[in-house]
Image (cartoon, rainbow, N blue to C red):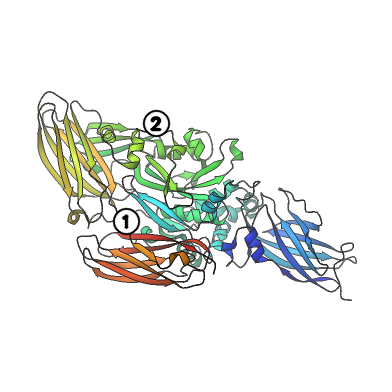
Amino acid sequence: MEDLSIQNVNLETSENLERHRTEGFSSSKALVVRRGDPFRISLQLKGRPFNPKTDSLRIKVMLGRLYVVMPVTFSRKVSSSHWKAYFDPEILSLQNLSIFISSPASASVGFYRFKLYVFTQDGQRSYTYGKFMLLCNPWCSEDAVYVPFEDQREEYVQNDSGLLFMGTTRNLVSRPWSFDQYESGVLETCLNLLQISPQHQKNRRMDYLNRNNPIYISRVVSAMINCEDDRGVLKGNWSGSFKEGVHPSTWTGSGDILRQWALTDYRPVKYGQCWVFAAVMCTVMRVLGIPCRVVTNYNSAHDTNKNLVIEEYYNEKGEKLNNSNDSIWNFHVWVECWMTRRDLGSGMQGWQVLDPTPQERSGGVFCCGPAPVKAIKDQRMDLFYDIPFVYAEVNADVYTVIVSKGRVVNYSKDTERVGSLICTKAVGTPRLQNITGDYKFIKSPTSTLTSRSSAISEDSTLRRAGPSKGVLVFLSLDKAPVAGEPICFTVKIVNKRSVAKVMKVHLNAQAKEYNHSPSDTFWETNGVVQLAPMEVKVLSQQMLPAQYEDVVGDDLINLAVVLEDIDSQEHILASEEFNIASPNLLIQVADENFIMRNKEQTATVIFTNPYSQPVSGVLTVVGAGLIPNKLQFRMLPLRPGRRVEQHITFIPSMVGTKMLQASLTLTNINSTIRGFKMVSVNRA
């Protein structure tokens, strides 16, 4: 009789993907499983039947040159710290064997191979190969990334779309983003990112060993998302010129970026800014099984000299000057990852700040974190990693200085502006979750922190105006500015003295990007105001659409008023930075309650021109799990107030809640109009 040998190995892919919650990766060529939980394989034998008394099986699992050899036993008792293989007691045919392979909850993440041997009594053996990808496991209580709530695991690991919050606290912008972790090639590219890292190239054995630790993995990924020290994914560009690449606002998801990086032999993709860096890192971490969410910090300080003070300079006309290396970004975007921190002792587990945007070096490399959010709130500057830098981003004080003819004529201090709102997408719903209180102590419900999150209060403007000998000035928007409408605002001047005052009034508006000092003035007006003793005077002003549309677009506006007392030459400043709410694209899906996988569906994208001039542009429609390739349509000039509709068809390929998103890039106005629709796809 022919001796015993292995004819075939079945990785039972469908069963294992469901068991390990990796069904989304079904397009991968390899089996994708999570550490700490067993997966099943089936062996088809040929020759004589398997004899448990005289024959044995062994499995050699290999990660690079690291390996472990284990016998296949009949004991189902597994260890959270060792590899184990055992026969499935439910299926014990002597011609077709079923085996479970269990990895430890602290196994290294990576692309594994395994070799399966059968030994017979006379010493003969045969073998076969297999391979699998091993990820972290937030469902396993022994794993360092364990999350105890299913809705959070669905949101922070499995959800392939989300919202990035931009704009200002006055006008929050919810930007749709497709994380694309299940799109073709993305999984392999994320694992290759670890292979290309300097840590792996320098010492492969140590890199493989360290990949058991999400702290190590997160620092590697944080550095590899930018390309400043390595062959990283993205090249940052804040210059305003993007001729050699793509404007960061053009990207709609991580898949295009990661695929382009892989297809160009891992050359940096041009270009990214903070929200792009963060969103791509979120994709990589979710692929690797580490819970991750994108976080926005409004009025984020970049404290270059580490003194927890940001200085801003204005001249006597209200123009903001670029006189400091420190800066405040209207918003800055990073990520948080969930993990235990055994290296820091108890109490520091949970969300950790990681920032792949290259701002400052950490350990000699442009990366940031993981910094425990709890440590930031508790001011634990002695702990790892980069806590002082993140603490300054959310807590620095702002000194506003007015200079005239080379000398300081007034300054004021604001302790509430920086970190005025810190937020992320809420679990299971396309809404904002305010997490400011996780980072800092909120003083009271009536503090400027709370008022800034919803509206601009007179108290906040007064605080920024600084001390005055007798005159106060307040600057407030009448309502949130909307594209195509006049920007209406009010200047309120209060004479606290019992003597008359004559004041010069300078009003100034400059366009600015979220992270830059403003550009040249595009709108200004001047005048003289006479104040009777104890008088309060209110000045109403407006900017017409024709005055700002060609200048601002997706940028923000820095608006300032400076009062100059003609007698005392005292200067008083009030300022606001705000964005203009763009119109949204409306997306309608036919029969949206009966959307089935593999069944053709229709949708309509609708745009109404709110601008004071005709607009034209290019409409792009994408949807992970809905549309395999982006759809693009050219929109002919559309007159003010007119409406256009674009009909599309799509065939969903994945079950679950998916995001259909559309963006209209205008050619004659510096603006992109966006919209999204959440679509629930059912099994046919």
Place residue 30 in its image quadrant: bottom right
What's the residue type where badge 2 is placed? Lys
Residue 410: image x %, image y %? 23, 31
Query: Which circle, 2 or 1, is nearer the viewer?
Result: 2
Q: Which comes before the other along the chain, label 2 or label 1?
A: 1
Left or right side of 579 for 21: right
Left or right side of 218 for 279: left
Residue situated furthest top in the rendering: 498
**Quick one: 108 or 158, which is closer to the camera?**
158
Q: Which mark is residue 240?
A: 1
Residue depicted at 38% across the width and 31% down the height: 444
What's the residue type where badge 1 is placed? Gly
Place residue 129 in its image quadrant: bottom right
Q: Callout 2: 10 Å neighbours few (<14), some, many (20+)?
A: few
Residue 658: image x %, image y %? 47, 61
- Provide the residue designation for mark 2: 443
Residue depicted at 80% across the width and 54% down the height: 75
